[in-house]
Amino acid sequence: MSLAPATLKTPGKVSSGSKIEWVKLSSVVLPLTVPVSDAKVFTGRQKPMTEVVFLFTEIRTADGAEGIGFSYSKRAGGPGQFAHAREIAAELLGEDANDIQRLWTKLTWAGASVGRSGLATQAIASMDIALWDLKAKRANLPLAKLLGAHRDSVRCYNTSGGFLHTPLEQVLENADATVANGIGGIKIKVGHPDSAVDLSRVAAVHERLNGSVPLMVDANQQWDRATAQRMGRILEEYNLAWIEEPLDAYDAEGHAALAASLDTPIATGEMLASVAEHWELIRHKAADIIQPDAPRIGGITQFLKLAALADHNGLDLAPHFAMEIHLHLAAAYPREPWVEHFDWLEPLFNERLETSHGRMHIPDRPGLGITLTDQARAWTVATAEFGGPHNSHY
C-alpha cells in the first residue's frame, strides 16, 4: 500500500451536499443460537464461539444521504475495534464523502502508530464500507452496479450447516435443506484430531450429494504440512471444489507446495488482515482460490486493490463471510466467483438475499441494500456520535 505524500494534499472545495456532517458508531453483540466449534476448538486452541461482535458505522451528508457499513470480530477484538474507530471517526467530519480512497488514507494516518493491518484497518473498514454504501445510494444503484458488475447473480455455497460440533446426521439434513433453498454448494469443516472422523464425514456428505452439488472442505489451519499432504491425496477421490485453509494462514510456502502437488484447488486468505499479506500468497502461488474478507482487510477500497491483483494473477475468488457485502464485490470480479452463504447475520437486517438455482442474486436496492432491525439496535452495547445536532462523542 502506498502512502505517498502526494495523497495527503489538501482537497479541493467540498460540495455542500456531499459534506459529511454526522457519524455514528455502534458496537452490536450478536448471540449465536448454538455454540459453534470448528477444528480450532477440537485442537484446544479456541473455545466454542457463542457470539459475534459487530462494529457498525452510519454516515450522513449535508444533503441527507446516508450510508451504513460494518466490520466484525469473532471471540475477541470487538471492543478494540470500537475503541479505535471512536478515536479516529471525527476525521471524517467536514470531508467530501465522494473521496473514499483519500479518506481511507487519512484514517490510516490518524492511527498510523498501530499499523496498517489487523484491528486498526478492521475499524477503518466499517467506515470505508459505509462510504461506498452512501456513494451507491447517491447514484441510486446497487453497489455491484456502481462498481461495474459482470453478472447479476453469483454462485453461492453454505458453510453454517457443516461445523464439526454438528452431528453427522444433522449435517446431512442441513445439506438437503441447503440445496432445497437454492444454494449451489456445500462446505463442511474438517481438521478433527482424528482424521478418520474427517474422512467418514466427507464420504457421507459426498454420497448424500451424489456428485450433483459441489463439495468443499475447510481445515481452519489445523493441519501441519505432512498431514495436509496426506489428507489432500486421500481427498482427491471426492473431486472437491477446494480444500480451504489446510495450513497456517501465513505459511505461504507450504500452501504453494501443496497447491503444486494436488489436483484439488487450494483456497485460503480469510484470516489475513491486509492487501500486503495477501500479496505474499499471490507471489508465492500459494492459492488457486483467494478468500479475502473486506471487513478484515480494510474495507471495499482495499478489497478492490486486492481483486485487481488476484485477477491479474489468474486466481479465482471466494470471499469469506459477510455475504451482504461480498455479494456485490464478487459480482464485480471478472472471473466467475463464489460467495459464502451464512444465515447467522439475518437477525441484524430487515432484508433477505435471494438464492435460487445455486446462485445468490444482487438485490435491486441501492447501495448494499441493508437496514438494521430493531433487534440489532437492542443488541447494541456502546455507541459514539460525531457531528450532527448533538456534536458529541462518548
Image: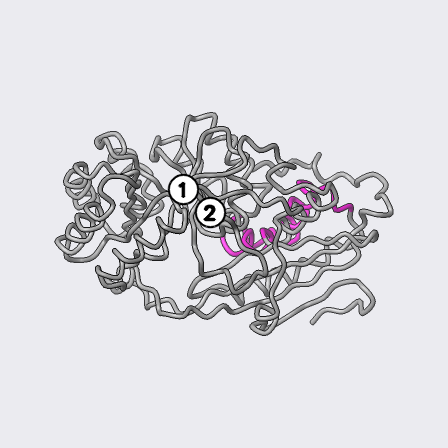
Residue 389 as seen in the image, left or right of residue 89 = right
Q: Is residue 355 rendered magenta in the image?
A: no
Q: Of the residues shown, which amino acid type is indicated by label 2?
A: Thr
Q: Which mark is residue 358?
A: 1
Residue 167 x, y percent position in the rendering: 23, 63
Viewer-proximal residue among 43 and 190: 190
Instruction: Residue 39: tell me if it is visible.
Output: no
What color scheme is it? one colour
Residue 177 x, y percent position in the rendering: 34, 55
Q: Residue at x 36, y 52 (%)?
A: 178
- Spatial CA distance of label 2 from label 1 is 7 Å
User: Could you classify mark 1 by the number of other residues whose Cα lies within 10 Å: few (under 14), some (14-19), or many (20 or more)?
Assistant: many
On the image, which quarter does residue 42 sit in? bottom left
Residue 352 as seen in the image, left or right of residue 131 = left
Q: Is residue 9 above or below residue 201?
A: above
Residue 208 as seen in the image, left or right of residue 241 = left
Residue pushed farthest left? 196
Q: Is residue 218 above or below residue 174?
A: above
User: Could you classify mark 2 by the number of other residues whose Cα lies within 10 Å: few (under 14), some (14-19), or many (20 or more)?
Assistant: some
Callout 2 secondary element: strand
Residue 376 x, y percent position in the rendering: 58, 68
Q: Residue at x 32, y 47 (%)?
A: 186
Q: Which mark is residue 11?
A: none
Q: Is residue 113 rendered magenta in the image?
A: yes
Q: Which residue is mark 2?
A: 355
Magenta segment: 96-125
Q: Are marks 2 and 1 in contact (CB under 8 Å)?
A: yes
